[in-house]
Image (tube, rainbow, N blue to C red):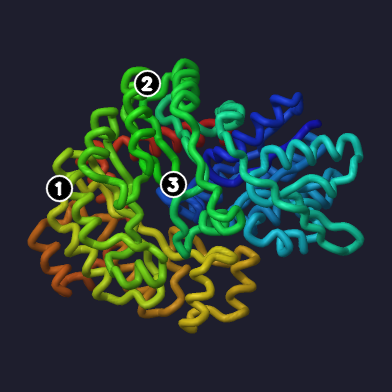
Amino acid sequence: MNVSFVHFGREHLGLEYLSAHLKNSGHEVKLFCDPGLFSREDNVFYAPFLEGAFKKKNIAKQVIESNPGLVCFSAYTTTFPWAKNIARKIKDALKAPIVFGGMHASLVPEKVLENDFIDYVIVGEGEQALLELVRGLGRKDSLSRIRNLCFKEKNKIVRNALRPPLDNLDELPLPDKRLFEKYVNFKDDYMIMTSRGCAFSCSYCCESHFNRIYNGSYFRRRSVANVINELKLMKTRYHFKEVMFFDSILFTDKPWLKELCSCYRKEINVPFRCTGHINFLDREAGEILKDAGCYCIDFGVQTFNERIRRSILDRFETNEQIRKALSICDELKIKYDLDLMFGLPEAKLKDYLLAVDFVKRSKSLNRLKCYYLSYFPGTPIIEKSKQLGLLDEHDISGINEGKIGDWFHVDSVKAAEDKILSETFTKIYKVYPLIPGFIRGKIAGGRMYRYFRFMPNFLVIAMQLLIAAKNNDYRFKIYINNYLTALSKIRR
């Protein structure tokens, strides 16, 4: 069968795995992608005046002209409205069935199926379910036995049983990287996942939903041999200069990490970065990572208010543990990014000042990355926010429809006072590495911070580029090259 994937945004590993699974069974797969350059989903350069010039406006038309047998969308909550708009246009012109998967569909499958132009929803892991759906549609078989599938029958929504998560990730074919070759410069950067799921269940994170529906068994790792096999094959194909381990947390298992890093250093030997968790970074783990070529770790701190982190976010690491982990990185000269979140329930001015004070002597700080709380359907933080009077039923209904704001823009913050603080400290955090020490102290003491609200956005961007140059931040070089690559191809 001819299967079309329709996607908004950057490279999507989930689609690459689905494509590989389908192609291995003899099906044809095409990708129709809008990279979202300069859009609200672009967390590097949001520029509305450029977005219009480079927006792909004919995706629905291209899908229709390809006459697929099945059209597939994988949507986050933030991209669900875009996906619905494209799916509706396709359905108006084609009889081909449309299936939605991905995070949002897994969170609220019944809500997604209320849209009459969506025929099927796949919940959870999709490789086997999608393949069985393609086969079932081709043979016109009954779909009632396809686990993870939801569909409409006689004006009722049928939700089939959930299959257990795949026990051995090594059984999956390697991701179909060719799917995104038109949109990604793999020579600069290769993205890989060595695991699925997350060992934690933070209240705001979609991963917590999978831990609940799979009874805590969703987090699994690939074998080191399988990971290295992929990297060796793709290094031969793309000659990449850097690797990005896209796992929720790379280093949860020290024996596995030792084996991976030993093989990586011998077989791959290019710089890499990863996401980590404070609780798992001790001196030994840091040395293992450093020796293998790790140059930067991204830590999701979110807030330095321990009470909010514990009672609102369901995160139980302490500030002292954070301090120790960052000290290890400073000693080993491993750079680190810290994710900080705005719009959190009960967050106050003192919490934003605390962040400035906490990192004012950090030696290897690369970036303070700014995000805004976006509510995802069914996550525990929704009930907590409802109890605090921050959300009502109307808000929750909007969240289920994807009307939640997004991670990158201040309009996700509702209260006017919180919005002013968020705008101000977003600018402070983004330019923080260039702020002189004596000014950092004054900001942490509650002075001078107000002036940053009036800093022009173009100056913030210019200072971020200076920080990238000062830190020799390879990620920014990759971003620039990816923009140039995408712009050259999208305009052809």
Q: Name the quarter where the C terminus is drawn.
A: top right
> What residue does disc 2 label?
268
Mark 3 vs mark 2: which is more N-terminal?
3
Density class for disc 2 (Cα within 10 Å; few <14, some 14-19, many ≥20) is some
Left or right of residue 46, residue 427 in this image: left
Instruction: Note whether 259 is above or below 233 in the view shown.
Output: below
Q: Name the quarter where the N terminus is drawn.
A: top right
Which label sits on residue 65?
Answer: none
Residue farthest along the bottom direction in this orientation:
389
Give whichever of 298, 320 is nearer the camera.
320
The amino acid type, in three-letter code, at marker 2 is Ile
Mark 1 vs mark 2: which is more N-terminal?
2
Density class for disc 1 (Cα within 10 Å; few <14, some 14-19, many ≥20) is some
Which SS class for mark 3? loop
Q: Residue at x 27, y 59 (%)?
A: 429
Name the spot of residue 186 as percent of width and height, x first. Answer: 46, 27
> What residue does disc 1 label?
363
The amino acid type, in three-letter code, at marker 1 is Lys
Closer mark to the observer between disc 1 and disc 2: 2
The amino acid type, in three-letter code, at marker 3 is Ser
Q: Place residue 150 in its image quadrant.
A: bottom right
CB within 8 Å, label 1 to label 2: no
Separation of marks 3 and 2 at Cα, in angstroms: 22 Å
Name the spot of residue 446 as percent of width and height, x first. Answer: 17, 74
Which SS class for mark 2? loop
> What residue does disc 3 label?
248
Which SS class for mark 1? loop
Q: Residue at x 70, y 56 (%)?
A: 84
- Asked if residue 61 can be seen in this view, the reply is yes
